[in-house]
Image (spheres, rainbow, N blue to C red):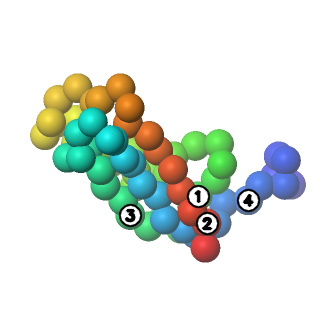
């Protein structure tokens, strides 16, 4: 039984920054849950950090379940 009735489901995730558009990215995942970022998003963020350095203060994560 899942806590608070939330089960992982498929959907789309995204990172966005108003101050530096280079950090904006998105993708799909088969395992979206409200309590953590999917592995695909974490991998994309790590790639951006290696490419661009320190992330901007206004970087936000979001997702939409399908």
Q: In which quarter of the image is the C terminus?
A: bottom right
Residue 42 vertical position relative to residue 33 in the rendered view, above or below: above
The label nearer to you, 4 versus 3, is 3
The label nearer to you, 2 versus 4, is 2
Give the quarter of the image for residue 54.
top left
Query: Residue at 51% across / 50% down in the picture?
Result: 62
Can residue 6 be seen? yes
Q: Which of marks 3 and 2 is nearer the N terminus?
A: 3
Q: Could you tell whether 9 is left or right of 54 in the image?
A: right
Helix, strand or loop at mark 4: loop
- The residue wearing badge 2 is 65
Helix, strand or loop at mark 3: strand
Give the quarter of the image for residue 47.
top left
Helix, strand or loop at mark 1: strand
Callout 3 environment at 10 Å: few (<14), some (14 to 19), or many (20+)? few
- The residue wearing badge 1 is 32
- The residue wearing badge 4 is 7
Callout 4 environment at 10 Å: few (<14), some (14 to 19), or many (20+)? few
Q: Which of marks 1 and 2 is nearer the N terminus?
A: 1
Residue 17 vertical position relative to residue 25 in the rendered view, above or below: above
Q: Which of marks 2 and 4 is nearer the N terminus?
A: 4
């Amino acid at each position: 039984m899942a806590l608070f009735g939330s089960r992982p489901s498929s959907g789309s995730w995204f990172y966005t920054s108003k101050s530096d558009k280079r950090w904006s990215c998105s993708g799909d995942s088969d395992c979206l849950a409200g309590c953590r970022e999917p592995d695909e998003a974490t991998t994309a963020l790590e790639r951006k950090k290696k490419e661009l350095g320190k992330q901007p203060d206004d970087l936000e994560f979001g997702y939409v379940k399908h």
